[in-house]
Image (cartoon, rainbow, N blue to C red):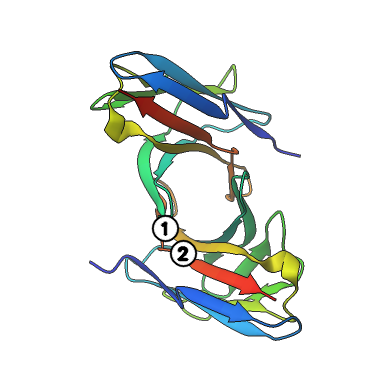
Amino acid sequence: ELKVEQNPLFLSMQEGKNYTIYCNYSTTSDRLYWYRQDPGKSLESLFVLLSNGAVKQEGRLMASLDTKARLSTLHITAAVHDLSATYFCAVLTNNNDMRFGAGTRLTVKP
Amino acid sequence: NAGVTQTPKFQVLKTGQSMTLQCAQDMNHEYMSWYRQDPGMGLRLIHYSVGAGITDQGEVPNGYNVSRSTTEDFPLRLLSAAPSQTSVYFCASRPRYFGAQHFGDGTRLSIL
């Protein structure tokens, strides 16, 4: 059975610091998605990673994908309070359904 | 741009009642999915569809039915509501090959 594991599940950061969220998955897949969810809201798509070695950046967030290691990372640079949210990774399976990690709840403190 | 529209936004049911959660998308996406989100857990896939007339089960399909008669609509039916089905339900759609998955605003369902 496909497992998608994120760590850490909870992350408290100081503004201005850097940190990385990890997403490991247990099956072959070359499509990895990152989403952001604010409390009480829906999910917002951040990145779609479509191949091994893919790297995408938007503002202070950068995502990468290593399909051989079955690992994706979401790197946060110089965190600001507005980045406080829950971040999910999701893997597209060979059956074309999408499986999510449990989420990383990020809190950025002044 | 409507995107993915879910109705209702909130619903309270009694145990044993049935109901249908509606989902419609206007982006001509082939793939549509239903997820439930429970506290402390990620989204779990209930059912999904790769096109009109085609549906398949996800991780947690028991107690739910779906149908896909058109590309635009993908309703989720609760057959006989149970307290364990209290959750937030999200509908989503995406293109067949590439591109992001778009989510509706969610339906907050409580079963007493």
Q: Quadrant of residue A106?
A: top left
Location of residue A30 with respect to B92 vertically, above or below: above
Location of residue B104 with respect to A18 vertically, above or below: below
**Residue in the image at 49% along x and 74% along y:** B10
Location of residue A99 with respect to B38 vertically, above or below: above
Alpha-carbon neighbours of circle 1 within 10 Å: few (<14), some, or many (≥20)? Answer: many
Camera-nearest label, 1 or 2: 2
Q: CA distance from mark 1 to mark 2?
A: 8 Å
Q: Are marks 1 and 2 in contact (CB under 8 Å)?
A: yes
Judge whether residue A74 can be spotted in this image: no
Disc 1 marks a residue whose amino acid type is: Phe
Q: Quadrant of residue A45?
A: top left
**Residue in the image at 46% along x and 60% along y:** B92
SS state under label 1: strand
Mark 2, residue position: B106
Foreground residue among B54 and A99: A99
Mark 1, residue position: B103
Disc 2 marks a residue whose amino acid type is: Gly
Residue A84 point in image, percent of width and height: 37, 34
Residue B79 point in image, percent of width and height: 72, 81
Foreground residue among A3 and A92: A3
Q: Is B58 left or right of A18, judged from the image as shown?
A: right
Q: Determine the chain carrying the residue at label 2.
A: B
Foreground residue among B89 and B84: B84
